[in-house]
Amino acid sequence: MTDRDPLPDPVLDPAAMRKQYRADGLAEEDLATHPMDQFARWFEDAARATLHGTLYEPNAMVVSTVDVTGRPTSRTVLMKQFDTDGFVFYTNYDSRKARDLAENPNVSLLFPWHPLARQIIVTGTARRTGRDETAAYFRSRPHGSQLGAWASAQSTVIASRTELDTAYAELEARYPEDEQVPVPPQWGGFRVVPETIEFWQGRHNRLHDRLRYVAQPNGVWKVERLSP
């Protein structure tokens, strides 16, 4: 039994789900010269949308990696920094994504900003951040998140939730709020250095605008328009 009212069948039919995008278009002449400057413009729009409750966590991105056998995996992580050198996120270096990147540094990022009818797709390579940069970010995290980085052996199989909660409780007793938590040696950042960045703007009748920056050997970024 359930206390939820049943939904009519059409509501559950993926083939019947469609939304007309009526946003303004994206033209080549409106783009910034550098893709990270264009990203900053769109990221500001996404951040402003959170103030109106129309978008949640604009820094959430889907990270796709490939393991040594060629099997892909995707997961959502939080971007914590971006600049002209790329995008930074943090993780356990023993996690599945980190192991994948150690074997194959090629990576794809996706920022799915559905309420704005926008998405950004990045392809590039990932490299570890320096320990000083990692430590600086780690010390900016809430105390509980610092303890969580120690408590979780990310991506490993555990017997129960109790095992995780017990590990956290032991760390909480060892490092109270007023005591500095050391940076875990197995935890740190990755900087994704982009090779292509595609800006996707939803348009009416599925005739979307797709403009892709492609890095050139001379350091210049070429812009291509892709058919939707």
Image (spheres, grey):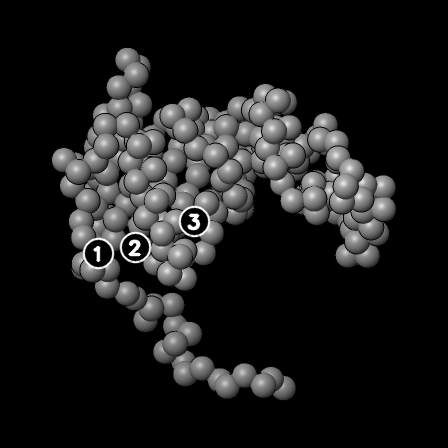
**Sequence-first disc among 3 and 1:** 1
Q: Nearer the viewer, residue 69 or 138?
A: 138
Q: Is residue 147 above or below residue 17?
A: above
Is 158 located above or below residue 222 in the figure?
below
Could you tell me which secondary element the residue under label 1 belongs to? loop
| Amino acid at circle 3 | Pro
Q: Which residue is mark 1?
A: 23
Q: Are marks 1 and 2 in contact (CB under 8 Å)?
A: yes
Q: Say which label, 3 or 2, has the lower sequence index.
A: 3
Residue topped by disc 2: 117
- Work out how far the residue at label 3 is from the one at label 2, CA to CA, in angstroms: 13 Å
Image quadrant in which you'd find residue 142: top right
Q: Amino acid at mark 2?
A: Ala
Q: Report the amino acid beneath label 1.
A: Ala
Image quadrant assignment for residue 179? top right
Give SS at disc 2.
Answer: loop
Residue 112: x percent and y percent? Answer: 39, 50
Q: Residue at x 82, y 57 (%)?
A: 162
Residue 103: % across, % down: 58, 26
Disc 1: CA contacts within 10 A as few (<14), some (14-19) or many (>=20): some
Callouts 3 and 1 close, C-beta under 8 Å: no
